[in-house]
Image: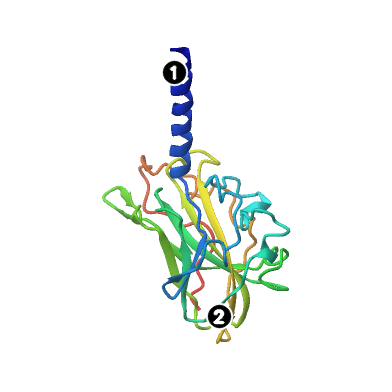
Amino acid sequence: MQYAALNMKAFAVLLAVVSLVSGHYTFPGFVHNGAVSADWQYNRMTENHYSNGPVTNVNDPEFRCYELDMQNTAASTSTATVSAGDTVGFQGRSSIYHPGYYSVYMSRADPAANSAQAATGKTWFKVWELGPTYANRQLTFPSASMQQFTFTIPKSLPSGQYLIRGEHIALHSATNYGGAQFYIACAQVNVANGGSGSPAPLVSIPGVYTGYEPGIMINIYSLPANFTGYQAPGPAAWRG
């Protein structure tokens, strides 16, 4: 009986762990004009590739790309060739369960996209976002059955090597500071057939958020009386 009880306890712990992991997600697939790459072929493998756990500290150096190894992962990741005007994005290993806000940032990658030093300064600009809608005192978020999110590379983006950083901010437990969960992926690309645009404004990552923004620290289940709509964190998106 004691042995059975111990087994049941171990089984309960295992179920809890499985439930925790299945509630989180990673984005190992790079989407290019509808085709999805092999896992981690062009996206830098993230530290949570096994645990699926989120980043919660917006000031952590790993907040940039959450690489498994900040010195060596970039060099072991391939660089995809794309064109300005193409549709690209990120594919999750599972559905994106949590309600939240999506955004995509890009950065010119010097000396190259597969360099660990790329995009470590004030070089990032937002190119796309998808947030909740607000009506009848309620926020309505993008479907929880989504498994990928994509955007169009602005046609005026100058040619060159870039990092593309996809981010989903899960807000289901964001009532207190540090409660928001960030799910991050960085793809390495070489953009061809670009234009002469000037992406702006430029921000640093980390540095783009304090964590106290009303779009990051928010109780989505009990909105304040003076709430007028979701305020997206970070800079305005550059559309090219």
Q: Is residue 231 visible?
A: no
**Relative depth, front residue between 112 and 76:** 76
Residue 82: horizontal and vertical position, in percent? 53, 79
Amino acid at circle 1? Ala
Of all residues, the one furthest to the left in this rendering is 136
Question: Which residue is at a point 48% across and 42% down the rendered structure image?
Answer: 21
As helix, strand or loop, the secondary structure at mark 2 comes to loop
Taking 186 as reference, is 223 left or right? left
Query: How many dots with numbers?
Result: 2
The disc labelled 2 sits on which kind of residue? Leu
Residue shown at the point (51%, 41%) measured from the top left: 179
Q: Of residues 155 and 51, which is closer to you in this image?
A: 51
Between 139 and 106, the residue placed more toward the observer is: 106
Q: Indicate the quadrant containing the N terminus: top left, top right, bottom left or bottom right.
A: top left
Mark 1 residue element: helix
Q: Check the image and report above or below for 119 versus 143.
A: below
Residue 103 at x, y percent in the picture: 48, 61
From the viewer's perspective, tell me whether residue 87 is left or right of residue 46.
left
Residue at 54% from the left image edge and 40% from the top image edge? 177
Image quadrant in which you'd find residue 207: bottom right
Return the residue at label 1.
4
> At which x and y percent is residue 145?
34, 54
Q: Which mark is residue 157?
A: 2
- Identify the mark nearer the N-term, 1 or 2: 1
79 lies above or below 144: below
* Residue 237 to residue 145: above or below: below
Residue 182 shows which numbered tag? none
